[in-house]
Image (cartoon, rainbow, N blue to C red):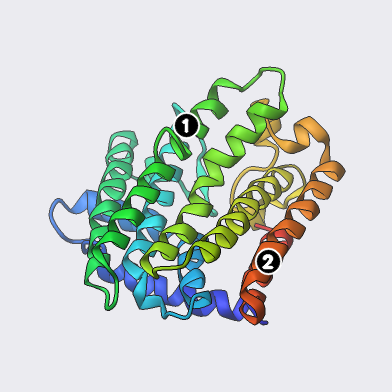
């Protein structure tokens, strides 16, 4: 399985769809649409929409079945990064090697850009009802799952706990809450939303949920490790910022080697869940390995 070639091909599908769905950069009011496109097309691996596409393909469907909902996840992810980079949050000047949105367009427009992307994301999910074979009930459940993963029971809640836990003594329950909500929720959401849009069975959903929960934790722990050991040029953002802010992370609590051991343990669990899909599990396993081995 050439996972890099697969990701590149699916990334092109996602990018083409995003170009089609987003308002043109010259549409009035021009500045907000320029700002939206600036951050959406500033780079990124499109992991979340690709997870939705990969799930659909694992279940025997093409990307088109889930494409609007898949792209909505990228818009939600991008909005979260724009707000995360603001001076009132992490105060970062660069994202993916480029100046952050507020550095280019100003803080007020950056806030509104995040708002606009989040709002448009939910409009986009409803467009999935037009996809061939998708039932309205599947769209409604996908909408609920993505909304829940984005709000106080998911990403926003995890971000809040991350912020209020800075410079405090780290603990495992807090660490687990942050990781499963701040990052894990929006890794699991595209998988489960796609399962709904593809009318997956109960056993398939259970296997996908276990896989997605473990993949989400892998993704965040690897992120934490890279913030300590990564190369700034490859990451496109500052290295060591977590330690400087005294954030609650796996390396801060357990150290690098124990964090890597935890990643291996989670990978084994994800692999067992993926095994439910037989030969089609190769794609899910290849992605898990790619997430572990990534350098950015």
Label 2: state its secondary structure: helix
Whole-percent x and y of residue 110?
33, 40
User: In the figure, residue 33 lies in which quadrant?
Assistant: bottom left
Residue 129 higher or lower than 90, as above or below: below
| SS of the residue under disc 1 | helix
* Residue with the mark numbered 1: 157
Q: Image check: 37 left or right of 160?
A: left
Q: Residue furthest left?
A: 28
For the point 43% across and 79% down, the residue is 61
Q: Residue at x 49, y 75 (%)?
A: 59
Between 22 and 152, the residue placed more toward the observer is 152
The answer to whether one can see residue 136 in this image is yes
Q: Is residue 172 left or right of residue 92?
A: right
Q: How packed is label 2: few (under 14 Cα within 10 Å), some, or many (20 or more)?
A: some
For mark 2, what is the residue?
290
- Which part of the image, by quadrant, shows the C terminus? bottom right
Confirm whether residue 85 shows in the render. Answer: no
Give the mark nearest the N terminus, 2 or 1: 1
Residue 250 on image: x %, y %:
74, 37
Determine the residue positioned at 67% across, 17% down: 168
Q: Nearer the viewer, residue 210 or 241?
A: 210
């Amino acid at each position: 399985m050439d996972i890099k070639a697969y990701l590149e091909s699916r990334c092109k599908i996602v990018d083409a769809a995003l170009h089609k769905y987003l308002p043109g950069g010259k549409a009035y009011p021009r500045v907000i649409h320029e700002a939206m496109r600036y951050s959406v097309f500033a780079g990124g691996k499109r992991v979340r929409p690709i997870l939705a596409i990969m799930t659909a393909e694992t279940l025997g469907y093409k990307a088109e079945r889930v494409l609007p909902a898949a792209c909505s996840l990228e818009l939600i992810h991008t909005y979260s990064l724009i707000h995360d980079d603001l001076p009132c949050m992490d105060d970062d000047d660069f994202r993916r090697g480029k100046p952050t949105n507020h550095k280019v367009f100003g803080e007020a427009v950056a806030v509104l850009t995040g708002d606009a992307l989040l709002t448009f994301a939910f409009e986009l999910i409803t467009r999935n009802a037009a996809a061939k074979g998708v039932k309205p009930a599947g769209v409604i459940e996908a909408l609920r799952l993505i909304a829940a993963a984005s709000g106080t029971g998911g990403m926003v809640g995890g971000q809040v706990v991350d912020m209020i836990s800075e410079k405090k003594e780290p603990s495992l329950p807090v660490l687990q809450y942050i990781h499963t909500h701040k990052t894990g929720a929006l890794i699991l959401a595209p998988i489960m939303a796609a399962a709904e849009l593809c009318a997956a069975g109960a056993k398939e959903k259970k296997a996908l949920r276990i896989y997605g929960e473990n993949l989400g934790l892998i993704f965040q722990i690897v992120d934490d490790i890279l913030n300590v050991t990564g190369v700034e040029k490859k990451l496109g953002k500052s290295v060591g910022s977590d330690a400087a802010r005294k954030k609650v992370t796996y390396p801060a609590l357990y150290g690098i080697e124990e964090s890597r051991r935890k990643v291996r343990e989670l990978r084994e669990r994800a692999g067992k869940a993926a095994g439910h899909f037989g030969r089609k599990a190769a794609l899910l396993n290849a992605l898990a390995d790619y997430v572990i081995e990534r350098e950015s």
